Image (cartoon, rainbow, N blue to C red):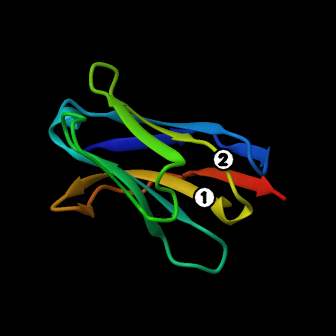
Amino acid sequence: QVQLVESGGGLVQAGGSLRLSCAASGRTFSLYAMGWFRQAPGKEREFVASISWNGVNTYYADSVKGRFTISRDNAKNMVYLQMNSLKPEDTAVYYCNALRSGEPFGSWGQGTQVTVSS
């Protein structure tokens, strides 16, 4: 079982940048694709980005394509989300999770709050 701790969120003005980090425990981390998800107030959790186990393949939601970049460091058991050109609609709690057949299957962490002011 992979356990996850997200960090790096904060308050930023529109157009700014943040880099989120996800620290994963467990020796099987490098076997899994990983994803970032977000949940805005009053909305369901949604997919943001994913990365294959070896970092070769990445996928993005249309809403963040060209602005966000997902990466991973298997030697450090870390996954990152670089967020540029942030918009107020990016405001949400961001979570990472391991993926199985494209679906999150691990326990959700506490997430990290991202707030973008206009």
Of mark 1 and mark 2, the one earlier in the sequence is 2
The kind of residue tagged 1 is: Val
Q: Which residue is mark 2?
A: 85
Residue sitting at x 19%, y 34%: 54
Q: Quadrant of residue 20?
A: top right
Residue 12: x and y in percent read: 78, 45
Q: Position of residue 83 (x, y in %)?
A: 58, 43
Spot occupied by residue 86 in the image (x, y as percentages of width and height) = 67, 51
Looking at the image, which residue sits at the far top?
75
Q: Nearer the viewer, mark 1 or mark 2?
A: 2
Answer with left or right where residue 27 lies relative to residue 41.
left
| 3D distance between C-alphas at marks 1 and 2 | 17 Å
Residue at disc 2, secondary structure: loop
Question: Which residue is located at x 21 percent, y 36 percent?
Answer: 56
Residue at image position (70%, 57%) is 87
Q: Nearer the viewer, residue 73 or 106?
A: 73
Check the image and report above or below for 69 versus 35.
above
Residue 117, labelled with which disc? none
Q: Residues within 10 Å of mark 1 (few under 14, many from 20)?
A: some
* SS label for mark 1: strand
Residue 51 rendering spot, x and y as whole percentages? 29, 45
Residue 15 vertical position relative to residue 7 in the rendered view, above or below: below
Q: Is residue 118 above or below residue 31?
A: below
Question: Few, some or many C-alpha atoms within 10 Å of disc 2 (few <14, some 14-19, many ≥20)?
Answer: some
Amino acid tagged 2: Ser
Name the residue nearer the viewer: 66 or 88. 66
Residue drawn at x 15%, y 62% is 101
Residue position marked by numbered label 1 in the rendering: 93
